[in-house]
Image (cartoon, rainbow, N blue to C red):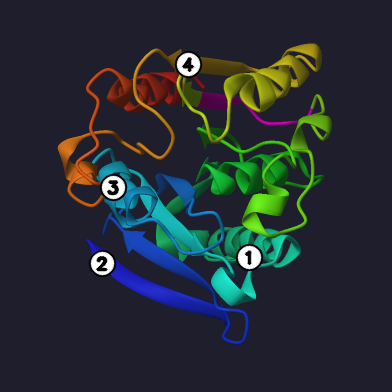
């Protein structure tokens, strides 16, 4: 595995972390958007997710969008555009197949991932949303001006995999995942959703590898989202 970082905008702290599987053939790619309420980047959603996808023969990329005092929703969206443009333009050197390049976002990163997957001209061939924030319900709490991405779904939205927990009190299913899946269904988008009876917000992979940097929060049942997601990706 090789690692390098590309800085797109030093002033806004927009960067792309590249986890290169050191493959000699083009692999599927996954662009990762960590959560953290725009205060910081949660390690549980970033490097450890990237390394896990690497073990499954994916090239992995983590987008570092503006957070903390530099947080800005529109700048965060621009970060994703820059990342996908860079990856697709350098696909050969990065040994990634742009036709198998998708996006995954957790929590606030899930809102950004959904927004990017819905925009015209998106280069994401699939989207994965983990306990996502999908409306503007948390704007005041987080301190940003976002958008209701449940209203942006179209028939061109790429296949989408969503997972969350019944007990998620920060981004309740009924306020976020439910209206989004309803929009996907009405627009005829290929999607799969898993609402687990256990686990909660911010569990990431929910295994011991992530638990050591996530207050020892693990859940074997919730962790099943990852193998289920891999099966779903194979079906595409």
Query: What residue is drawn where x is 51% and y is 22%?
Result: 236
Q: Nearer the viewer, residue 82 or 115?
A: 115
Q: CA distance from mark 1 to mark 4?
A: 28 Å
Q: Is residue 93 above or below residue 21?
A: below
Q: Which residue matches tag 4?
A: 194
The 10 Å Cα crowd at callout 2, few under 14, some 14 to 19, many 20 or more, is: few
Q: Secondary structure at mark 4?
A: strand
Q: Earlier in the sequence, mark 4 or mark 3?
A: 3
Residue 193 lies in the magenta stretch? no
Give the label on residue 79, or none. 1
Give the label on residue 2, or none. 2
Q: Secondary structure at mark 3?
A: helix
Q: Earlier in the sequence, mark 1 or mark 4?
A: 1
The boundaries of the magenta stretch are: 156-162
Residue 151 at what x, y percent from top left? 83, 31
Q: CA distance from mark 4 to mark 3?
A: 23 Å
Q: Earlier in the sequence, mark 4 or mark 2?
A: 2
Give the label on residue 54, or none. 3
Residue 86 at what x, y percent from top left? 58, 66
């Amino acid at each position: 595995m090789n690692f390098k970082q590309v800085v797109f905008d030093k002033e806004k702290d927009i960067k792309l972390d590249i986890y290169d599987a050191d493959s000699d053939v083009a692999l599927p790619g996954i662009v990762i958007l960590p959560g953290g309420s725009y205060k910081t980047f949660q390690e549980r959603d970033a490097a450890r997710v990237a390394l896990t996808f690497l073990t499954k023969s994916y090239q992995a990329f983590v987008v570092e969008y503006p957070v903390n005092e530099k947080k800005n929703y529109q700048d965060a969206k621009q970060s994703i555009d820059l990342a996908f443009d860079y990856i697709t333009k350098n696909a050969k050197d990065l040994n990634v197949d742009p036709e198998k390049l998708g996006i995954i976002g957790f929590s606030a990163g899930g809102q950004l991932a959904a927004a990017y997957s819905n925009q015209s001209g998106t280069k994401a061939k699939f989207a994965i949303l983990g306990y996502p924030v999908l409306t503007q319900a948390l704007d005041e709490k987080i301190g940003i001006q976002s958008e209701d991405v449940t209203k942006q779904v179209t028939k061109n939205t790429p296949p989408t995999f969503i997972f969350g927990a019944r007990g998620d009190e920060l981004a309740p299913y009924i306020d976020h995942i439910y209206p989004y899946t309803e929009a996907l269904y009405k627009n005829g988008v290929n999607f799969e959703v898993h609402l687990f009876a256990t686990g909660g917000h911010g569990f990431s992979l929910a295994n011991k590898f992530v638990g050591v940097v996530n207050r020892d929060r693990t859940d074997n049942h919730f962790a099943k989202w990852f193998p289920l997601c891999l099966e779903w990706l194979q079906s595409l």
